[in-house]
Image (tube, rainbow, N blue to C red):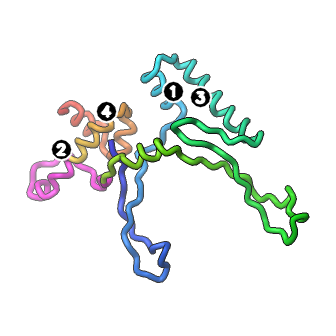
Amino acid sequence: MSIYYRVQQRINPQDRNGKKQYFLIQRSAGYIGREKLIDDMCTHTSLTPQEASAALDYFFDSVPKFLKLGFTVGLKGLGHFYTSIKSSGSDTPEEATAHKKLITKVQFIAGKKFREDINETPIEKFPSVKVNYRQPLTRQYFKEKGKKEKTIEMVKNCLDEGLDTKMIMRLTGLTEEELDGIIKSI
């Protein structure tokens, strides 16, 4: 399991007048929605889909409820949610009233264990070239030999994590036939 990145050239934010440098930018593996969370909860716990759905619904309803009451909502091991207020400035304390509020933001601070766990996850470069498995073995193919192995390794990691084939195709750029060929060969 790895977090994927791509390389992008940017101006260094600490030195706007300096030369452009190359930075690692995280590449999302895709979007995990409510249904995938429920499926994962059911797979890894004894909850039924209805119980998992009810638990998620309650969580999504209760966090905003307690934030609106002025509480910080902490989840041991995960982190805590809290609100912050952005307002326009005032010259005197008396002028600083609720009507100066511009926006209320919801913030999240990850807990130490959660941060450390994510920080220890290895990263690897996201493959940028789609591999054609029906391509004849040419000299060019042998020059790019490592790409095929990297893609197979990525497919194995995705399958180990329980991702469905549509997600794997989106992540790797493979067609359904190419992915089926890899899965059969594993």
Residue at the spot 36% in from the left edge and 51% down from the top edge: 4
| Residue topped by disc 2 | 134
Residue at the spot 43% in from the left edge and 81% down from the top edge: 18
**Res. 56 mark:** 3
**How would you rate the neighbour count of disc 2 (Cα within 10 Å): few for under 14, some for 14-19, many for 20 or more?**
few
Q: Label 4, label 1: how many angstroms apart (C-alpha)?
A: 18 Å
Q: Label 4, label 2: how many angstroms apart (C-alpha)?
A: 25 Å
Q: Earlier in the sequence, mark 3 or mark 4?
A: 3
| Image spot of residue 22 (x, y percent) | 36, 69
- Left or right of residue 52: residue 93: right
- Left or right of residue 87: residue 37: left
Looking at the rendered image, the disc whose residue lies closer to the viewer, 4 or 2, is: 4
| Residue topped by disc 4 | 160
Q: Tell me the amino acid under the disc marked 4.
A: Asp
State which region is magenta. 125-149
| Image spot of residue 5 (x, y percent) | 36, 55
**How would you rate the neighbour count of disc 1 (Cα within 10 Å): few for under 14, some for 14-19, many for 20 or more?**
many
Q: Earlier in the sequence, mark 4 or mark 2?
A: 2
Q: Tell me the amino acid under the disc marked 1.
A: Ile
| Residue 119 inside the magenta-drawn segment | no
Q: Tell me the amino acid under the disc marked 2.
A: Arg
Q: Label 2, label 3: how many angstroms apart (C-alpha)?
A: 44 Å
Q: State which quadrant residue 157 falls in.
A: top left
| Residue topped by disc 1 | 38
Residue at the spot 49% in from the left edge and 45% down from the top edge: 112
Instruction: Tell me: residue 50, above or below residue 36.
Output: above
Q: Earlier in the sequence, mark 4 or mark 1?
A: 1
| Image spot of residue 177 (x, y percent) | 27, 37
Q: Tell me the amino acid under the disc marked 3.
A: Leu
